[in-house]
Amino acid sequence: MSRQLVSGVVLFFFVGLLTAGTGQFIEAPQFQVGTNPQAVAVGDFNADGKPDLAVINSTSDTLSILLGNGDGTFRTKSDYVTGITLQGVVVADFNGDGAKDVAVSNSASNKVSIFLGNGDGTFQAKVDYATGNKSIGMAAGDFNGDGHPDLVVTDAMDGSVGVLLNNGNGTFKAFVPYNTGFNPRQSWFETSTVTGSWTLRRPITTTTPATWSAFC
């Protein structure tokens, strides 16, 4: 399968401000990231109350962290080496220390990489966990009610969705797959509280056949 290579890709970030009296958006500033950025997640990585960005670059196989200045601009990126061909990114506090962590899915190396945050905008070296074949979509949620964010990942080639349960310290149990339709591409979930518990639903989009799978 061919992949378009894009050199010197920049991230276009639109600041939600209007010019005075014109109803027009201010021209978007540009911020350098890696090659072929695939997805972005937002979190406060240095605990200054300002939103920062985590961008995954699927051709350069890097995670770019851009710390926010609080005015719609961002500092120069810091890059972290990931697995191969990034597809998904999630921000959560996986080890319960109050600092935001980042998880990325690597579709070519069939792994999820966890980057634990130090709370100052930097991250520890990645720790990899094996998944199924061609991990694409990913989401975080407390799937076993222990108060710790777990991960759910779709595996396109296996026709499955798998769960990585959090041990509570930022490490995860072995990947457990569940069958879906062929070639699931994305995962997300809805949560609702009922007497203090969570009900989780994870619709999985598939391309062949066109179906939805829900796990409750």
Image (cartoon, grey):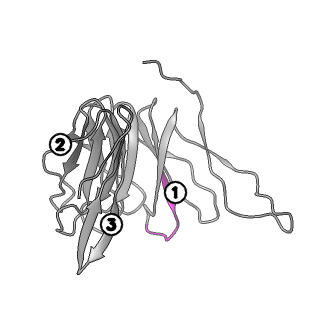
Pick the front one: 25 or 168: 25
- Counting from the top left corner in percent of width and height, residue 161 is at 25, 43
Q: First in sequence: mark 1 or mark 3? A: 1
Q: Amino acid at mark 1?
A: Leu
- Counting from the top left corner in percent of width and height, residue 165 is at 17, 55
Q: First in sequence: mark 2 or mark 1? A: 1
Question: Residue at label 3?
Answer: 191
Q: Residue at x 27, y 50 (%)?
A: 152
> In the displayed structure, does residue 148 sit left or right of residue 1?
left
Count of all numbered marks drawn on residues in the image: 3
Residue 49 belongs to the span the image colors magenta = yes
Where 187 sits versus 87, above or below?
A: below
Q: Residue at x 38, y 37 (%)?
A: 210
Where 138 sits versus 7, above or below?
A: below
Question: Residue at label 2?
Answer: 177
Question: Residue at label 1?
Answer: 67
- Range drawn in magenta: 47-54
Question: Local crowd at mark 2 within 10 Å, few (<14), some, or many (≥20)?
Answer: some
> In the displayed structure, does residue 7 sit left or right of residue 83?
right
Residue 210 belongs to the span the image colors magenta = no
